[in-house]
Image: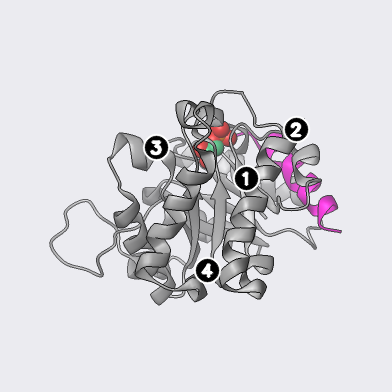
Amino acid sequence: MVAGNWKMNGSIESIKILLDGIKQGLGEVNNAEIIVCPSSIYLGEVHSQIKDTVISLGAQNVSEHASGAFTGEISVKMLKDYNCKYSIIGHSERRTLYSETDQLIAKKFVTLCEAHTIPIFCIGELLDEREAGKTEDIVGRQIDAVLDLADIFAFKNSVIAYEPVWAIGTGKTATPDQAQEVHSFIRKKLSVLDADIGEQVQILYGGSMNASNVAQLLSMPDIDGGLIGGASLKSADFLAICAAANAAAE
Ligand code: PGA
C-alpha cells in the first residue's frame, strides 16, 4: 500500500498536473493499493479525476463528531459522499501543532470504523523519546488509547502508519532495521490480542520515504507500504514508489 499525504499543498491546477502524471505513468498495478490524500477542499475535484482508475481516495483528517455545530470540521459522512475509503488520523502534525491527544485520536478511530471508513492511524515517537529509549512505550501508549475505547477488532479494517516524528519531512529516514524493529513490536502487540488481526494488519512506514530508499524499507518483513509526504507531490517520485511497492508485493 502506498498513500500520498499531500498535506496543505496544491491548487486546482497543480493537482490536475500531478494526477495526470500519475494516471499516465501508473500502468499495471496489480498488487499494491494506491491512495492519494488531498486537502479536504479538493476531495471532490480529486474524486472526479480518479474515477475509473485504481487510485483510492483518502482524507487527511476527520471530526470525531457525526454532525452539528463544529465550525471548520468535516464529518465522516461528508467524506463518504466523495467515496473516501480512507482517512489519515493522528498525524504527528495534528498531534503537535493542533494539540490532538491520544484520546481524541482514538475517538476519531472509532468514528471512522463505525462508518466503515478505514483509518490510517499514525503513531510515532519524537527524537528525544527515541534517544531516551522510550519508542516502544510511546507507540504502545498511542495504540492503547484506541484499545481503551474499542477492542482489538477495531484494528481488523484499519491501517497503521509508523512515522517516527524525527524522520518526517527531514530527509532523515529511519534505517530499515530501525523501522522493522518498531513494526515488529506493533504487530506482536496486536497479535497477543488476536493472532489473525496482528498478522493481517497493514503497517506502513512514513518519514522521508522516497524513490531511493523505498525498496530496502519494503524488503523488511513487517513493512507493508508507505505513507509518503514530500515525495508524493511529484508524479515521477510517487510513481517510482508505487512501482517498488507493486514489485515488493509480487
Ligand atoms: P515525508 O512526510 O514523506 O515528507 O517525510 C511523511 C508524512 O508526514 O506522512
The residue labelled by disc 1 is 182
Residue 111 in sight from this viewpoint: no
- The verdict on label 3 being within 8 Å of ligand 1 is yes
Q: Tell me what residue is drawn at x 72 percent, y 53 percent.
A: 222
**What's drawn in magenta, residue-wise?**
233-250
Quadrant of the image where one finds ligand 1: top right
The residue labelled by disc 4 is 155
The residue labelled by disc 3 is 93
Numbered label attached to residue 194: none
Q: Earlier in the sequence, mark 1 or mark 2?
A: 1
Task: Locate residue 164: give its quadrant.
Answer: top right
- Gap in angstroms between the C-alphas marked 4 and 3: 22 Å
Which mark's residue is nearer the viewer, 3 or 1? 1
Which mark's residue is nearer the viewer, 1 or 2? 1
Q: Secondary structure at mark 1?
A: helix
Front residue of 184/209: it is 184
| Residue type indicated by callout 4 | Phe
Q: Tell me what residue is drawn at x 62 percent, y 45 percent.
A: 182
Quarter of the rendering occupied by the C terminus: bottom right
Which mark's residue is nearer the viewer, 4 or 2? 4
- Gap in angstroms between the C-alphas marked 4 and 1: 17 Å
Task: Locate residue 69: give its quadrant.
Answer: bottom left
> Magenta stretch containing residue 85, yes or no?
no
Locate residue 19, reporting x and y percent. Answer: 61, 46
The residue labelled by disc 2 is 213
Q: Earlier in the sequence, mark 4 or mark 3?
A: 3
Decide: marks 4, 2 in contact (CB < 8 A)?
Answer: no
- Gap in angstroms between the C-alphas marked 4 and 2: 28 Å
Locate residue 4, reporting x and y percent. Answer: 58, 45
Decide: marks 4, 3 in contact (CB < 8 A)?
Answer: no
- Gap in angstroms between the C-alphas marked 2 and 3: 23 Å
